[in-house]
Image: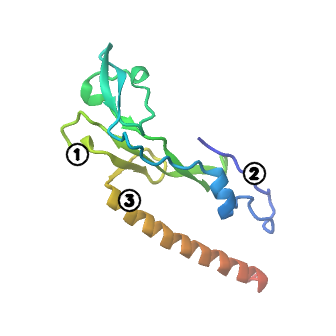
Amino acid sequence: MSNKVQSAVNSADEPIPFFLTPKSEALAAPAIPAPRSEAAGRMVQARIGGALVAIPCPTWCVVDHVEDDAAFIQDVSHHSLPISLPAPTFGDPQTEEILTADVSQWPFSSGHTAEPFVSLDASGDSLCAELAPEALEAFADQLEAHADKLRQLARLAAAARTAGGAR
């Protein structure tokens, strides 16, 4: 899911048209659905080793378990809709999806992934951290602090432009 953002070519005075106000951000980003009361799930068909079987599936899962065709029951996984942040980059495409995250679960695993967790691909390299809800909350706090620093840099750059900068 790559969004191209056109930028001015060879014009240092033109801002990159990559700006979302809080209102446009809310309009651009679909809301994450709240957990439903039947969060334990529902029974769905899944193809496992070529055979159709019924498995429990949480309401937040968007996987088509028949299409997925897992080799073994341990390969069955649940995933919510992912979210990501399009970040401006140099070149083509001019944005890169970062901070891609979804709720994931391998319910038939004997490991820690049997419980739902947040899968976080921070840099778009498909290497995902497996975060407990509390860890993701702490990371979100760090992101807010980083966003404040980004705003400070924006104000510093604006002040430097007003002052004429060093040319």
At label 3, which amino acid type do we have? Answer: Leu
- Residue 45 shows in the view: yes
- Residue 20 % position (x, y): 68, 60
- Residue 81 % position (x, y): 48, 41
Quadrant the N terminus occupies:
top right
Is 157 left, or right, of 136 in this rendering?
right
Give the numbered dot on residue 112: 1
Residue highlighted by disc 3: 136
Point out the tag, 3 or 2, that comes first from the N-terminus: 2
The residue tagged with tag 1: helix, strand or loop?
helix
Point out the tag, 2 or 1, that comes first from the N-terminus: 2
Q: Could you tell me if the residues under marks 1 and 3 are in contact, i.e. CB atoms within 8 Å?
A: no
Badge nearest the viewer, 2 or 1: 1
Residue found at the very far left of the displayed protein: 110
Question: 112 or 156, which is in the foreground?
Answer: 112
Residue highlighted by disc 2: 6
- Looking at the image, is 52 positioned above or below residue 140? above
User: In 3D space, how far apart are the residues under numbered discs 2 and 1 (Cα atoms)?
Assistant: 43 Å
